[in-house]
């Protein structure tokens, strides 16, 4: 039987593209998102691309009851999952000088609690089957507190740690946990960034293909592109705090919108 794959946040960007690439491989897909028309459209496209069966999971990963109902639907139909790609994510640029706890709540609700909610629903069956792969889409932004991105960086750092703890707890259970940390990939999320501010920007197709390749190899950590991941993981992450603060202050000045610029 063909692979049973969940992708959360499949209505645009990386999620949508992964759905189409996996559809071409003949996977059965359960796709989630909040925007109804977009969800119906990606499900239609996935069927035309070759997915033998596609489940439409309309709703937010932040809604515990909805996630439980969505997993119940998957379980009734397929008995469980082979892959779960926890991809749904949000983020925006906010200056800590106008600190907003609500912005943190909104970001964590999707990026952290959304993933946790899905793990609670799907892990017991994967563990019982002694098989399955869970991939969480984190970010290279997880590895330092980036300027103007406090909530996003903190949520992805929390996700990286959540996935790591889950991986070590599940060692030997037959269930693998993959942490994916992309650099910049073209999507609705990055379309909001100023042009020229995203070094080594990848196409959505390339980003999605690299994630799928990493999951197939059941790699613990998938980071890309190397031109950005190597400096972040082996340089920036270990830079002494005083040096990092100075560098980040410079980055902050270059990222801050010019108040005199036309809107
Ligand atoms: N693009 C990059 O450069 C980059 C880099 C590092 C990490 N990432 C991560 O990659 C993942 C995909 O992002 P993307 O770049 O492809 O951005 P995107 O095009 O904005 O896609 C985000 C997806 O998440 C869904 N989503 C948001 N909130 C949701 C919620 N509460 N419940 C269910 N679905 C929700 C959105 O669908 P609805 O609005 O329809 O719900 C959409 O399908 C995110 O986790 C992002 O943080 C992206």
Image (cartoon, rainbow, N blue to C red):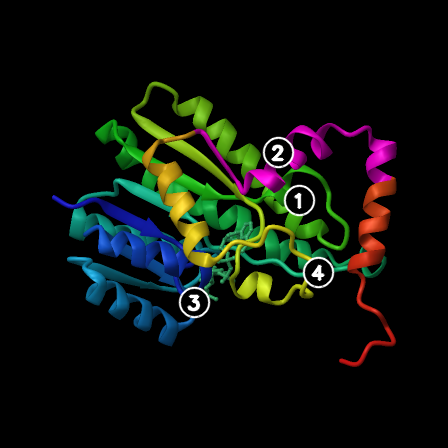
Element on which disc 1 rests:
helix
Residue that appears at 22% across and 48% down? 75
Residue that appears at 60% across and 55% down? 107
Q: Which mark is residue 34?
A: 3
Can you see residue 73? no
Element on which disc 3 rests:
loop
Disc 4 CB within 8 Å of nearest ligand 1 atom: no
Residue ID for mark 4: 93
Q: Say if the magenta span includes residue 242.
A: yes
Residue closest to the eye, 231 or 16: 231
Q: Distance between the residues labelled 1 and 3?
A: 23 Å
Disc 2: CA contacts within 10 A as few (<14), some (14-19) or many (>=20): some
Q: Upstream in the sequence, badge 4 or badge 3?
A: 3
Q: How many numbered marks does the figure carry?
A: 4
Image coords of residue 206 (percent x, y): 43, 52
Disc 2 CB within 8 Å of nearest ligand 1 atom: no
Residue ID for mark 2: 230
Disc 3 CB within 8 Å of nearest ligand 1 atom: yes
Element on which disc 2 rests:
helix
Image coords of residue 246 (percent x, y): 88, 41
Residue ID for mark 1: 154
- Horizontal relation, residue 15 to residue 239: left or right: left
Residue closest to the eye, 69 or 161: 161
Q: What is the span of residues highlighted in magenta in the rendered image?
A: 220-245
Q: How far apart are marks 4 and 2 (CA)?
A: 24 Å
Disc 3: CA contacts within 10 A as few (<14), some (14-19) or many (>=20): some
Disc 1: CA contacts within 10 A as few (<14), some (14-19) or many (>=20): many
**Farthest left residue?**
1
**Farthest bottom residue?**
262
């Amino acid at each position: 039987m063909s692979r049973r794959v969940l992708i959360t946040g499949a209505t645009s960007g990386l999620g949508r593209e992964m759905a189409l690439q996996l559809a071409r491989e003949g996977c059965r897909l359960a796709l989630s998102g909040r925007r109804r028309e977009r969800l119906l459209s990606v499900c239609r496209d996935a069927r035309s691309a070759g997915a033998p069966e596609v489940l439409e999971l309309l709703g937010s990963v932040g809604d515990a009851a909805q996630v439980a109902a969505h997993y119940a639907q998957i379980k009734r139909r397929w008995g469980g999952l082979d892959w779960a790609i926890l991809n749904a994510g949000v983020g925006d640029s906010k200056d800590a000088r106008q600190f907003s706890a609500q912005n943190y709540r909104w970001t964590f609700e999707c990026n952290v609690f959304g993933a946790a909610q899905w793990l609670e629903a799907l892990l017991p069956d994967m563990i019982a089957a002694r098989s399955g792969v869970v991939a969480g889409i984190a970010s290279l932004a997880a590895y330092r507190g980036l300027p103007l991105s406090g909530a996003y960086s903190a949520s992805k750092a929390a996700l990286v740690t959540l996935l790591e703890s889950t991986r070590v707890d599940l060692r030997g259970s037959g269930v693998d946990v993959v942490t994916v940390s992309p650099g910049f990939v073209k999507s609705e999320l990055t379309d909001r960034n100023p042009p020229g501010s995203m070094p080594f920007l990848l196409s959505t197709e390339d980003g999605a293909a690299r994630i799928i390749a990493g999951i197939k190899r059941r790699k613990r950590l998938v980071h890309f592109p190397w031109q950005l991941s190597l400096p972040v993981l082996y340089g920036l992450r270990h830079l002494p705090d005083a040096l990092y603060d100075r560098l980040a202050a410079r980055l902050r000045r270059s990222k801050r919108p010019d108040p005199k610029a036309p809107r």
